[in-house]
Image: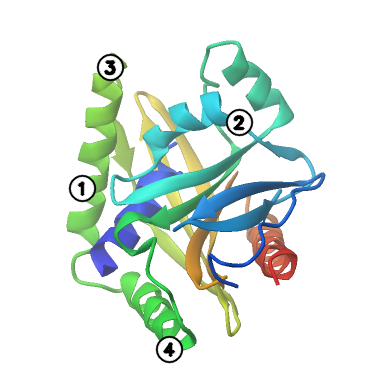
């Protein structure tokens, strides 16, 4: 599981109660999805973003490793408009993804299980297989682009961990920064990630932004924590 978690982080950078409870109703600023058969409300990560809807979400599966399933994707209003016109924005400098691990989607995750998930994430950044996993992530993304007749190579630079953003009983936040090259264009992206346990399911939240120094890191830390807290509160 440790390898797949790290691959998920890197591939994402290249562009990345219980089931018997009554289904909650979505309101403005949140969308209803199912993880392992359990209805879960997923709030918008930040105010200038919106959930992209089925058609665009299907195309954004490109950013998700095969071991995970994309539940929700969020873009800025401008980027949603570009996707809706049939194109792909030249560079996504801010976006967010919510994913669930396919093999564990229907498994009830209890507090002790979640602690193991957190321990795996904490070990990722210093793991001996990090470089090999990064190479595999590059190859997977390049293969997917070629399948879409997009002749661009993906190169992932060395990921720099930003450490733990926050640690709570049902949410663990972390961050990384990495340069990403697509063709002849390179951009440095920062990611605020979180593993969140909600209704006995584990969701992975990823919020990406172009890196512009410590202000980006501070923004990601705050935004990711608020997003995680909102997710838990709206599904309590």
Q: Nearer the viewer, mark 1 or mark 2?
A: 2
Residue to which mark 2 is pinned: 53
Q: Nearer the viewer, mark 4 or mark 1?
A: 4
Residue to which mark 1 is pinned: 135
Between disc 4 and disc 1, whose residue precedes? 4
Question: How many residues crowd around disc 4 within 10 Å: few (fewer than 14), some, or many (20 or more)?
Answer: few
Q: Nearer the viewer, residue 128 or 34?
A: 34
- CB atoms of marks 1 and 2 within 8 Å: no
- CB atoms of marks 4 and 1 within 8 Å: no
Q: Tag 4, which secondary structure? A: helix
Marks 4 and 2, how far apart at CA: 34 Å
* Residue 73, above or below 202: above
Residue to which mark 4 is pinned: 112
- CB atoms of marks 3 and 1 within 8 Å: no
Between disc 1 and disc 2, whose residue precedes? 2
Whether residue 210 is visible: no
Marks 1 and 2, how far apart at CA: 31 Å
Marks 3 and 1, how far apart at CA: 18 Å
Between disc 3 and disc 2, whose residue precedes? 2
Residue at position x 74%, y 51% in the image: 25
The x and y percentages for residue 158 are: 34, 54
Image quarter of the C terminus:
bottom right
Q: Tag 2, which secondary structure? A: loop
Labelled disc at residue 164 = none
Residue to which mark 3 is pinned: 151
- CB atoms of marks 4 and 3 within 8 Å: no
Whether residue 183 is visible: yes
């Amino acid at each position: 599981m440790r390898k797949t978690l790290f691959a998920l982080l890197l591939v994402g950078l290249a562009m990345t109660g219980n089931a018997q409870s009554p289904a909650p109703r979505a309101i403005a600023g949140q969308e209803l999805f199912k993880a392992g058969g359990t209805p879960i409300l997923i709030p918008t990560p930040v105010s200038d973003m919106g959930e992209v809807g089925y058609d665009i979400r299907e195309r954004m599966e490109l950013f998700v490793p095969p071991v995970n399933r994309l539940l929700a994707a969020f873009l800025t209003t401008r980027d949603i408009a570009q996707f809706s016109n049939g194109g792909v924005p030249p560079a996504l400098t801010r976006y967010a993804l919510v994913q669930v691990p396919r093999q564990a989607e229907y498994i009830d995750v209890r507090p002790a299980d979640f602690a193991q998930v957190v321990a795996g994430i904490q070990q990722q950044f210093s793991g001996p297989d990090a470089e090999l996993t990064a190479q595999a992530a590059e190859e997977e993304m390049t293969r997917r682009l070629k399948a879409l007749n997009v002749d661009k190579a993906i190169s992932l630079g060395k990921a720099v961990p930003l450490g733990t953003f926050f640690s709570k009983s049902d949410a663990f936040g972390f961050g990384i920064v990495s340069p990403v090259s697509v063709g002849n264009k390179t951009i440095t992206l920062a990611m605020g990630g979180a593993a969140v346990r909600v209704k006995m399911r584990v969701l992975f939240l990823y919020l990406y932004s172009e890196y512009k120094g410590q202000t980006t890191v501070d923004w990601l830390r705050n935004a990711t924590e608020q997003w995680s807290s909102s997710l838990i509160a709206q599904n309590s």
